[in-house]
Amino acid sequence: MGPGLFSDIGKKAKDLLTKDYISDQKLSISTYSDTGVALTSTAVKKGGLSTGDVGALYKYKNTLIDVKVDTGSNISTTLTLTDIVPSTKTIASLKFPDYSSGKLEAQYFHHHATFTTAVALKQSPAVDLSITLGTPTFALGAETSYETGTSKLTKYTAGISVTKPDSCAAIILGDKGDTIKASYIHHLDSLKKSAATGEITRRFSTNENTFTVGGSYAVDNLTIVKLKLNNHGNLGAVLQHEVIPKSLLTISSEFDTKALDKTPKFGVALALKP
């Protein structure tokens, strides 16, 4: 019932303009064992390179364990513990053999505030901090990243959002004050499958503006169409269909309307779930 995480500010509009817009071929198959372990196998082909991974997800009471092994012999492990202390969540992630990519994160949730801190598990780590104040309707917050090795702030961002049952507006000042982004999303139905959104970004150092409009439309209970277009002429489209219950086929394409001779990006993904 609180203001949510800082990363939630502007997330709904961002997801509508970026999520499911893919440029590769992806197949994922999920199964569930009798012991409650969720297994997911994924194969991805991007250009001439093919990769794959197998992941296992297990939840027991307030503990969530996520393990993933990919074709590059990398093992990623994430351990999430909820309510060790009331209203908290602790997330530990580690990747083998790249131990330096490990991170420990703690989140605290209150009715009127949310606080997070994350520390990289390496020598001279970066420390990330964020705080959000407000309510589910109105929230303002900030985040920063401090590099202990150089004793410098490498990132600081501030944001504000206003959320209503059928709409959400947000303004984010990022890139150390060099970029300001304003977004608005309006849901057109009670299930929030159809929506319209607009986003404008201003970069002060280059005096550049980027304006993007987009939306999603539920053709029926099984099919959703998404479109987006920015002032640079980049047009994207997504067709997503539920082929069987909980299993989605996603087809995506993006191209430059000002350079139609260029080959457009094309992607397809099939996610099969029992």
Image (cartoon, rainbow, N blue to C red):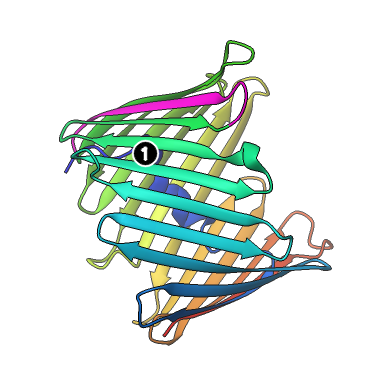
User: Which corner quadrant holds the C terminus?
Assistant: bottom left
Q: Give the dominant element type of the magenta stretch: helix, strand or loop.
A: strand
Q: Tell me residue 202's x, y (percent).
A: 55, 29
User: Which corner quadrant holds the N terminus?
Assistant: top left
| Element carrying mark 1 | loop
Quadrant of res 84: top left
Which residue in the protein does label 1 denote? 9
For the question of whether residue 168 can be seen, the reply is yes
Q: Say which amino acid is labelled 1.
A: Ile
Residue depicted at x 52% and y 60% = 67
Q: Tell me residue 65's x, y (percent).
A: 42, 58
Magenta-drawn segment: 122-135
Give left or right: position of 43 versus 224.
right
In this view, which residue lies farthest toward the bottom?
244
Residue depicted at x 56% and y 40% = 102
Closer to us: 179 or 124: 124
For the question of whether residue 21 can be seen, the reply is no
Quadrant of res 126: top right
